[in-house]
Image (tube, helix red, strand yellow):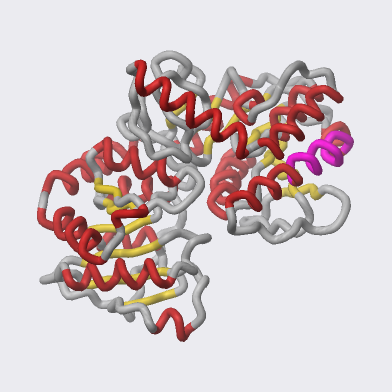
Amino acid sequence: MRAVLITPPLPSHLRAFEALARELTRRGHEAIFLTEPGVALQGGAAQVTLPGPPARPQPRRLLAEIVAGARRTDRLCRDGLPVLRALAPDLILGDQMEPASGLLARALGVPLVSVACAVPMDPEPGIPLPFLGWPHDTTAQGLRRNAGGERVADLLMLPQSRVIRRWAQAWNLGDLRRLQDCLSPRLALSQTVLGFDYPRPVNGAHIAPLGPFRRGQAAQDFPPDIRPDGTRPFVYVSLGTLQGHRAGLLSRIAAACRQAGAQVLVSHAGCLSEDRARAIPADWVRPFVPQQAVLERADLCVTHAGLNTALECLMAGVPMLAVPLTHDQPGVAARIAQCGAGLRLQPWQRSPARIREAVARLLSGPRFRDTARSFAAQADDWPGAAGAVDRIEARVSPPTRATG
């Protein structure tokens, strides 16, 4: 089987897709990434790039991100179809955040498997869009609220909607307008797990909750120059790979944790200069740390509520204080709170006093820790990338390719 993988060039999405590619390759399949020029992959993954210059750097502001995403979708559709015809894939593995994958699969007439690296985008009554931090609510009021959120999202996503509609019309694919219209209705591979994501009894039969795809990496040692005092709580603070530049928020969090009696390690993902990092009032400030090793020692993680970090915390049995910032993080934070593995603070709740109060509550009460540990006890049974490829193989039975 030859699979072509299409995903936005976001670090966490690339790492998840690379894990799927490794498992496909291990089983004797071909896994080829289709990317814009300039996208660097890890682990020797096979890659075919579109013609033309490298993509522009990913912007940080939401509206600029939407416009950049629409440009990327347009470029993939414009330049990707002849490339894919030459590759003749048996399957397209498409990130749910990149509608070009669904458009191209339909244009080629090959199976599409959607991949939810973040919270699944598939519509479900009672579930708000992932970037909204609202609860699961199937009442009439909840359905009205979600419908209002979708109308606002449709306005924000107009640049991408225009691109989707234009290529759908050019290729006679029907009236496709929204990102959700480009998803696979037959199989979606999700990194969420049962008990964490909201229930999906109506439209969720095709969504496979598998847990993190990145499992079984070589363990890294805990940094030898970081020596927590075992008599005091140890808190790990990270805002992920894209938000570590928020020095003011990191400083407020670090100060509040220390006021709550904890030792604090801050990781800023290389987003701060040495001078700005040095000004953060934490016990340790590092550009990067081996997150899995740190979580195995931590009593609490203060996180931006990226799905990968949230799932790694659950695997380690570590409760969380979620401070969502962008993308699907409000939706992940809402799920952290509803499943009982942590608390969340909305943007207007992030004063030093509120952060200190939340940290103290999480460190003093066993309920959050016990809930997180209950997920950790199940983690060995999460199928991950192996389960994802099991489902891909069951979905696709390609013709035998001539070799030699």
The reply to whether the magenta stretch includes residue 29 is no
Q: How far across and down, in percent of the image, does residue 384 sit?
A: 45, 37
| Quarter of the figure with the C terminus | top right
Residue 25 as seen in the image, left or right of residue 325 = right
Quadrant position of the N terminus in the picture: top right
Tell me if residue 233 comes above or below residue 323 in the rendering.
below
178 or 305, nearer to the observer: 178
Residue at 79 percent of width and 40 percent of height: 74
How many numbered discs sit on the rendered protein?
Answer: 0
Q: Is residue 162 above or below residue 259?
A: above
What residue is shown at x 52% (from left), y 26% (from top)? 122
Q: Is 56 displayed left or right of 214 in the figure?
A: right
**Horizontal and vertical percent for residue 89?**
77, 30
Q: Is residue 353 above or below residue 99?
A: below
- Viewer-proximal residue among 367 and 187: 367
- Tell me if residue 131 can be seen: yes
Relative side of 346 to 390, left or right: left
* The image quarter in which residue 59 lies: bottom right
The answer to whether residue 390 is visible is: no
The residue lying at 44 percent from left, 26 percent from top is 146
Residue nearer the viewer, 4 or 272: 272
> Does residue 78 show up magenta in the picture?
yes
Side (left or right) of 360 relative to 335: left
User: Is most of the magenta stretch helix, strand or loop?
Assistant: helix
Q: Which residues are magenta?
A: 72-82
- Residue 48 screen position, x and y as percent: 79, 47
Position of 386 relative to 263 (above/below): above
Residue 168 x, y percent position in the rendering: 78, 24
Residue that protrudes farthest toward the top in the picture? 202
User: Which residue is painted at 43% across and 30% down in the image?
Assistant: 128
